[in-house]
């Protein structure tokens, strides 16, 4: 099968599976990660577009957060799909590696990507977690899990292990301090670092305003 057909078939498969999903892992998220990964990969001389695009399309195919913590569920589901398309072993292996390596695993846990395609997809996925869309997705995820927006009595934790990060049930505002505000400094590619700047600043403005309203500080203007 030609590369273009492999990509189109995979996009159709994932669109059907994720359309209307409400936890922040919806088709529109995946579509944006796909487009952003492609744009980033085009700036990287050594990145292969087929591996990048398949990796982006399949990166959330069976996320461990929604599969009882099973970290191999994603790579396994990707392999099953790519096998059904007859994709060559080498490409399949590189796509599986992206899915295995992509997730954030806690403040203190390094998440290096072993290929330039992986760097493009991880950066694109992390750009989705910051900025206005990042704010919306964080609260969509928190709502999906039944978490409060904010609770000043619960201090943010900088998780030193994936195990403690996985068990976290903190209010959504804590997620900004535990993860989202650190993402800008954990990107690999100059293209993503450039995009992240404005998104990061927007998040800081959002948090400042949120806490101001929470504390009723703007009431003094009445
Ligand atoms: P990543 O792809 O960076 O590993 P995830 O798949 O962990 O991101 O998260 C998907 C979306 O859900 C992101 O926007 C992320 O910020 C949000 N999210 C994940 N965990 C939490 C949480 N504990 N509270 C609020 N939002 C979360
Ligand atoms: Ni994602």
Image (cartoon, helix red, strand yellow):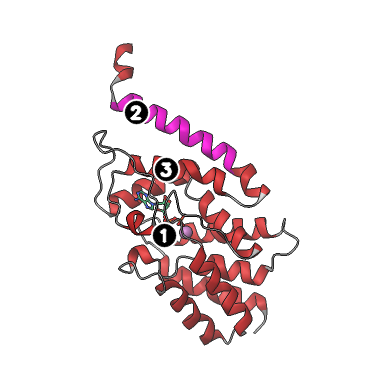
Around disc 2, counting alpha carbons within 10 Å, would you say few (fewer than 14), some (14 to 19), or many (20 or more)? some
3D distance between C-alphas at marks 1 and 3: 14 Å
Please state the horizontal and vertical placement of residue 57, each as a whole percent of the image.
53, 67
Q: Is mark 1 within 8 Å of ligand 2?
A: yes
Around disc 3, counting alpha carbons within 10 Å, would you say few (fewer than 14), some (14 to 19), or many (20 or more)? many
Residue where numbered disc 3 is placed: 135
- Rendered view: 126 above or below 121: above
Q: Residue at x 37, y 61 (%)?
A: 21
- For the C terminus, the quadrant is top left
Question: Which label is found at residue 25?
Answer: 1
Q: Give the residue at the far right of this rendering.
A: 45
- For the N terminus, the quadrant is bottom right
In magenta, the rendered stretch is 196-214
Single out the mark in the foreground, 2 or 1. 2
Q: Is residue 187 visible?
A: yes
Please state the horizontal and vertical placement of residue 61, each as a whole percent of the image.
44, 70
Q: Residue at x 51, y 73 (%)?
A: 12
Q: Nearer the viewer, residue 30 or 90?
A: 90
Q: Is residue 28 visible?
A: no
Please state the horizontal and vertical placement of residue 159, each as a whole percent of the image.
38, 49
> Are the residues flagged by discs 2 and 3 in contact, CB closer than 8 Å?
no
Q: Earlier in the sequence, mark 1 or mark 3?
A: 1
3D distance between C-alphas at marks 2 and 3: 14 Å
Q: Earlier in the sequence, mark 2 or mark 3?
A: 3
Q: Nearer the viewer, residue 44 or 153?
A: 153
Q: Residue at x 41, y 59 (%)?
A: 25
Magenta stretch: includes residue 203:
yes
Question: Which label is found at residue 211?
Answer: 2
Please state the horizontal and vertical placement of residue 36, each as a whole percent of the image.
60, 55
């Amino acid at each position: 099968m030609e590369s273009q057909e492999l990509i189109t078939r995979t996009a159709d498969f994932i669109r059907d599976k994720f359309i209307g999903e409400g936890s922040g892992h919806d088709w529109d998220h995946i579509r944006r990660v796909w487009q952003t990964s492609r744009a980033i990969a085009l700036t990287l001389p050594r990145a292969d577009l087929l591996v990048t695009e398949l990796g982006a399309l399949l990166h959330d195919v069976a996320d461990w957060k929604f599969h009882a913590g099973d970290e191999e569920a994603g790579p396994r589901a990707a392999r099953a799909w790519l096998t059904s398309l007859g994709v060559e072993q080498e490409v399949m292996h590189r796509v599986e590696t992206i899915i295995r390596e992509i997730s954030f695993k806690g403040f203190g846990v390094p998440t290096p990507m072993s290929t330039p395609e992986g760097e493009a997809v991880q950066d694109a996925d992390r750009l989705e977690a910051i900025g206005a869309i990042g704010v919306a997705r964080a609260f969509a995820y928190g709502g999906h899990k039944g978490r409060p927006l904010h609770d000043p009595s619960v201090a943010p934790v900088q998780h030193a292990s994936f195990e403690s990060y996985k068990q976290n049930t903190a209010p959504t505002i804590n997620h900004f301090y535990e993860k989202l505000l650190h993402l800008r400094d954990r990107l690999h590619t100059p293209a993503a670092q450039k995009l992240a700047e404005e998104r990061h600043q927007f998040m800081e403005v959002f948090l400042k305003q949120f806490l101001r309203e929470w504390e009723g500080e703007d009431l003094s203007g009445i």
